[in-house]
Amino acid sequence: MMKSKLLLAACLAGGVSVAGAAEDASGGGLGVRVGTSGIGAEYALALGSHFDLRAGYYFGSFSQGVTEDGIDYDGDFRFNAGAVMLDYRPFAGGFRISAGGYTGAPEIKLVAEGDNEQFDVGNRQYTADGRLDGDIDLGGAAPYVGIGWGGRPSGTGFGFSFDVGVMFTSSPGISLTATGNACDSTVVACNPNGLAGFDVNDPNDPRAQAFQSELEQERQNLEDDAKDYKYWPVVNLGVHYRF
């Protein structure tokens, strides 16, 4: 569901990596790619007719609306990592099997804002004039495996590349905070800025304390929903030049 939207948004909005690979016994290449691992540039060095070594840097960001546990968020996906890949070309041609890793996983930030809007937080419903801020931490270094096609069996010049694979990140760590005013509208409609409203971060208000308990439950729900991010899909299109 969300992964399909993610792939489409990233391929349109811009992730790039460089596909430069030589298929004969010597030489190297430079290139750029765009996809779900960010915008990047790579250098590839041929290690014989069957192996290439690639190293690059990936960066950039894109925004995509996502729904987690019934709450609509504006998602911000950011990339900032180096990568090293070893390509194996079993037929000494364009097809390759790749393994390696990224120095950092994508960073994900979620924001849901409401102006007298209703949110299901934990097991209660609140009407809020404020926002929820979430961070999804996927850890540091992330291994990668995938397959691809690209490059020239021989000669020099430009070529195109395509790769698809999986980045294996850490189990998501979630933080979720709230700001603004809210009121409990589980049973009866209310105005967060009226008598029934309260500051969600007021430590002396029992209603705010109850809200914070529900917010912690919501954080746990979000953590369960975010487990799919542990297997980050990587789809990259690239152009490169071999010399």
Image: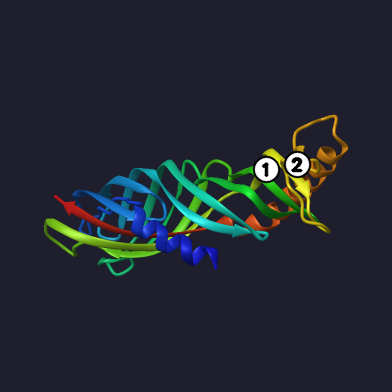
C-alpha span from label 1 to label 2: 25 Å
Q: Looking at the rendered structure, which numbered label has been put on residue 176?
A: 1
Taking the image as shown, residue 31 lies to the left or right of residue 220, namely left
Residue drawn at the location 71% of the way across and 50% of the way down: 127
Query: Mark 1, mark 2: which one is toward the viewer?
Result: 2
Dividing the picture into quadrants, the one containing residue 93 is bottom left
Q: Secondary structure at mark 1?
A: strand
Q: Quick one: 233 or 28, which is closer to the camera?
A: 233
Q: What residue sits right under mark 2 in the picture?
A: 194
Q: Which of 92 and 151 lies nearest the eye of the viewer?
A: 151
x and y percent of residue 1 in the render?
55, 68
**Left or right of 160 on screen, residue 80:** right
Residue 96 badge: none
Residue 63 lies, in percent from the top left, at: 45, 51
Tell how many labels: 2
- What residue is shown at x 43% (from left), y 41% (from top)? 81
Residue 171 showing in the rendered view: no
Quadrant of res 160: bottom left
> Which residue type carries mark 2?
Gly
Q: Residues within 10 Å of mark 1 (few under 14, many from 20)?
A: some
Mark 1 or mark 2: name the one nearer the start of the chain: 1
Residue drawn 11% across the image and 59% down it? 155
Instruction: Give percent across and percent down for residue 33.
Output: 30, 53
* Horizontal relation, residue 94 to residue 141: left or right: left
Residue 157 at x, y = what percent? 12, 56
